[in-house]
Image: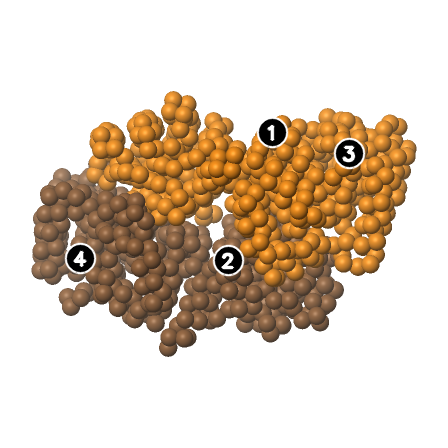
Chain colours: A brown, B orange
Amino acid sequence: MTRTCDFGRIFNPESVAIVGVSPNPGFGFGRGMFYSILEMGFAGRMYPVGPKGGTIEDLKIYKTVDEIPEEIDFAVIAVAAHRVPEALEACRKKGAAGAEILSSGFSEMETPEGIALEEEIKRIARKGIRIIGPNCFGIYCPESGLTLLPGPDLSRERGPVAFLSQSGGMSIDFAHIGKWMGVGFSKVVSFGNGADLRESELLEYLRDDSDTGVITMYVEGVENGRDFFDVLRNTAGRKPVIVYKGGLSDSGGRAVASHTASMGGSGVIWGSALRQCNAVQVGGIMEMAQTSLAFSLLPHKIYKGIAVMGGGGALGVNACDIAEPLGLEIPRLKKETENRIISILPRPGSSAGNPIDVANPFVHPQILKETLLLAAGDEKIDLQIMIQLLYHYKAFARGLGADSLRDVVPCNELADGVKEVVDITGKPVIMVLPNIKQEIESMDIEEVMREARKAFLDRGIPVFDDIADALKAVSRVSGYCRRRHRIS
Amino acid sequence: MTRTCDFGRIFNPESVAIVGVSPNPGFGFGRGMFYSILEMGFAGRMYPVGPKGGTIEDLKIYKTVDEIPEEIDFAVIAVAAHRVPEALEACRKKGAAGAEILSSGFSEMETPEGIALEEEIKRIARKGIRIIGPNCFGIYCPESGLTLLPGPDLSRERGPVAFLSQSGGMSIDFAHIGKWMGVGFSKVVSFGNGADLRESELLEYLRDDSDTGVITMYVEGVENGRDFFDVLRNTAGRKPVIVYKGGLSDSGGRAVASHTASMGGSGVIWGSALRQCNAVQVGGIMEMAQTSLAFSLLPHKIYKGIAVMGGGGALGVNACDIAEPLGLEIPRLKKETENRIISILPRPGSSAGNPIDVANPFVHPQILKETLLLAAGDEKIDLQIMIQLLYHYKAFARGLGADSLRDVVPCNELADGVKEVVDITGKPVIMVLPNIKQEIESMDIEEVMREARKAFLDRGIPVFDDIADALKAVSRVSGYCRRRHRIS
């Protein structure tokens, strides 16, 4: 890790060559990337390159990289594997700080030719150009407008979460999930085979990157375990690092070998090493996204006592049963608080011992807000979770003869109320918005749910589909902070 | 359990009294139930009853139950708690075999008045009428058209799954989830406080009910543990019983007390008792629904070797890592099979060692079908899981300049192909259709996903959102069959 890397020119290039662009419509990766970067609104200069020449969107397609009339900062290489070394060398000569190689056909093929080709590009890299890939989806950076392979529609909104991924599919999926779930990104790097830049060096960079507050990683195998865990321990002492390790089973290990030419490793050893580093281990992409969401929107502190509020007794019971094994408590509120809450809730059917059963899904946002304020007043409560069954409003809308579901669901009022509670009390509130009506005829419910999610996210309130996911994510934040506190 | 119960007249009544119907529009439960049953297309005779008289939808509202001009089979009681005993007694005199009491305000209040009222209705029940409830959402029976409290829009399609629930919210939620997830119901009973009919007697009835092939239960507490576990063991020897026990934590136990006046109990004791009965324990409503789906659509047998197929290497790795701890294997296919599969898949990027990476999400349904046929030919494979990332077709549709996403996603072709594979090979195929693009702008993807789900379900192919859920459900079916085999 002694080689230099000008990450600034790689993530925020002013000029980019896209090598492998055909003038003819079709599904070539190079054309796809050209259009994707264009649609993302990349502000720098783009130089498409392809042997046939021609034009694309009124831009000249250069026949070779040499012909580009200026130095380039970064290159996207999407040509057949055997033509990659030549293209890479040309980009190096044009002064590029780095290149992402989207092409596959390298060491992941487990063939002598593939392995030799990868060695060849490594040799070129050592002469001064840094490589992302090969066999990857590249870089997504909302700040500059660089985007992943099939990603013309990723968000330009920046956020605190960085993601390093050996898997291209995982990188694009997480970037898409983040868009609606409310996870904003600083930098996403799909590095595939990791012939040059990979986990340890990228992690070290992100540790010191002031735009990154939370780091997530999908790892299939690491190049140098000792280096990696050194950097990981060191980084996790500064900011949370969420690690999703794939290939921990026997067959999973076999699968990673043919996917990114990595060694899987033992689940027990990885689990223990990650714990020692105070990394946060997750087991799937949705869990990774939910954990990132919690780390980006909740203050990093220890949470113990949770108030849970919703319409429906079984939901509260479920919350308790899930919370306790996670080390979270749903403590009984002070009798006085309980009485004050019960006095404002509809009767019968409500109860306020915590979990708080508000009796029905149509309780006025003002009452819900007061309930949250009262519960937050109990010193045992560190955080509140409100479950809203918005789908019940469909029957409500019918009863009222309303034209549209949107007219009756008080999304913004609810979201404003919750935001005020957080501002006043300083105690976070998490929303849980399940949707159990997913039939084709209920697309209107889905639409309202998505708008509701956005309304809360716009006010910095995290939203989960499911109480179990919400509690698990809170326990992750709390556990990380407890261990960091203990270690330091 | 020696009292008689005419379940036939309760689930499939020819005449029903609905007590507590006001002639004035509003949100009364009685009116709501009247309209719900009407909209469900109940074929029997309905007799609305309310002290104000008047009419509703051209039907006379009788001022008292006595005035109804014939004997009734069943009654829905939705009046204030203190007026329930009188109404119940009147229904008994009118010959009703049973009544569901939707009203709350009984023992769950933990007040002397509430407890006394519940004792009073129990006394009336002992004179010959059976009670569902109080504090419940009643009965849903697709065959007859009876429906739960806020359930005018439940499915009339029958299926093999019965559900017994102490929680009303859980009953309506599961009934709604079943509608789109593909879980069809024989009978759903929300019995709330369970003053009369409850878990053991209902379970015994369902054990012998030929319309019911899979039983699910949400239990907060049982009246008589010994009776319950006797019936449960006996029933689980005949058909699968899926049990979701709520209130196993300290705070959860407190919550069930105020919800349905039940005792929670220890998680360890419940877990071990359920295992001894070979009941299938689940920990949440979605898990319960997914497990029911697997038990209703998969042959009840032991599954060991799974073939996993999808576009994207990390998905396969993830599947392996989840499968192994569940006791499932993703075994390497015979070299010959592997070679034949690889010869028909796009290159590079594909691999066929199992998991099978088909390289991209747009592989033609015919190729996918052939791949499934080839993999099923390996004797190590008992079941196949195909992951389809349909959301990627959005970019594909743009590339083609297609008007609508629906025009390019080959749902029916895929579903036909999969169905043929199952028919030819006799080995089940499960579809996994994740949707990672849930932003407001991608409602078209959601719509196509829902249509795809329906296309597969119409052909008897189970669909899950997530590979982890699918594998867990398979392991549940397999584990139940293994233990039953061992016990018998």
Mark 3 or mark 4, which is nearer to you? 3
- Give above or below for B175 relative to B105: above
Q: Residue at x 71, y 71 (%)?
A: A336
Q: Position of residue B60 (x, y in %)?
A: 85, 32
Labels 2, 1: one chain: no
Labels 4, 1: one chain: no
Q: Quadrant of the N terminus of chain B?
A: top right
Whole-number angstrom distance, CA of label 3 to CA of label 2: 46 Å
Residue on which disc 1 sits: B157
Query: What numbered label is drawn on residue A470?
Result: 2
In depth, the one of A310 and B282 nearer the eye is: B282
Determine the secondary structure under disc 1. Answer: loop
Residue on which disc 3 sits: B4
B337 left or right of A110 in image = right
Three-letter code, disc 1: Glu
Three-letter code, disc 4: Asp
**Chain for numbered disc 1:** B
Q: Residue at x 30, y 50 (%)?
A: A247
B16 left or right of B182 in image = right
Mark 3 or mark 1, which is nearer to you? 3
Q: Residue furthest top?
A: B424
Residue on which disc 4 sits: A196
**Chain for numbered disc 4:** A
Determine the secondary structure under disc 4. Answer: loop
Three-letter code, disc 2: Ala
Earlier sequence position, callout 4 versus callout 2: 4
Badge 2 vs badge 1, beta-carbon distance below 8 Å: no
Badge 3 vs badge 1, beta-carbon distance below 8 Å: no
Badge 4 vs badge 1, beta-carbon distance below 8 Å: no
